[in-house]
Image (cartoon, rainbow, N blue to C red):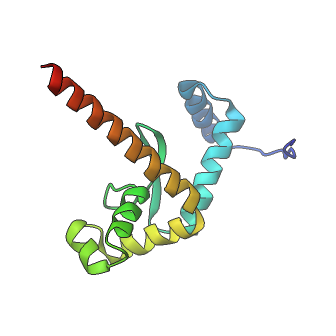
């Protein structure tokens, strides 16, 4: 499906920065601009969330914690929504951080569910590889 076109005038410094990111990441100017706008809108909709580059790509994170939203939600689900247990597991998260993660999850559940599954699969593969190395040592 074709995307409607809009013309947008960018400040020279902003345009230069987007071009730098596009060149560094080997992506198109339009793709980088759309990703930046998407992240900005998500951060506005979900205060306390920011985005950072991680091994598996850009990731929604909880401000002030270094935790990915997927990590918070994974642990929240593991303790079956018990906030006291979660506070013992993630003492630096706090109530505000949890609320930010839950709001983001409410809006983007499939993204977070996919991140949880991808990270669990990567961990299982790493664990299987490590146990295979130990047997051959």
Q: How many marks?
A: 0
Query: Relative to 54, is 38 above or below?
Result: below
35 sits to left or right of 112: right
37 sits to left or right of 2: left
Query: Relative to 60, is 129 above or below?
Result: above
Residue 81 at x, y percent in the picture: 37, 76
Residue 69 at x, y percent in the picture: 42, 59
Quadrant in which residue 16 is drawn: top right
Residue 68 at x, y percent in the picture: 39, 55
Quadrant in which residue 132 is drawn: top left
Q: Quadrant of the N terminus?
A: top right
Residue 42 at x, y percent in the picture: 58, 60
Query: Relative to 112, is 104 above or below?
Result: below
Q: Report if residue 91 is visible in the image.
A: no
In percent of the image, x 50 and y 56: which residue is there?
Answer: 112
* View extreme (front): residue: 135
Most foreground residue, 25 or 1: 1
Q: Quadrant of the C terminus?
A: top left
* View extreme (left): residue: 137
Query: Relative to 115, is 79 above or below?
Result: below
Most foreground residue, 79 or 86: 79
Quadrant in which residue 95 is drawn: bottom left
Q: Report if residue 54 is visible in the image.
A: yes
In percent of the image, x 16 and y 19: which residue is there?
Answer: 136
In percent of the image, x 60 and y 39: which residue is there?
Answer: 13
100 sits to left or right of 37: left
């Amino acid at each position: 499906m074709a995307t409607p076109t809009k013309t947008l005038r960018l400040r020279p410094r902003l345009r230069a920065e987007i071009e730098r990111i596009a060149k560094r990441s080997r992506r198109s100017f339009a793709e980088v601009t759309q990703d930046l706008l998407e992240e900005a809108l998500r951060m506005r909709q979900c205060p306390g969330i920011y985005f950072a580059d991680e091994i598996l790509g850009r990731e929604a994170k909880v401000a002030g914690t270094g935790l990915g939203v997927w990590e918070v939600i994974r642990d929240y689900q593991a303790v079956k929504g018990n906030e006291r247990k979660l506070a013992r597991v993630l003492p630096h998260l706090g109530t505000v951080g949890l609320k930010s993660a839950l709001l983001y999850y409410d809006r983007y559940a499939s993204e977070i569910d996919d991140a949880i599954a991808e990270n669990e699969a990567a961990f299982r593969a790493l664990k299987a590889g490590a146990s295979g190395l130990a047997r051959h040592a």
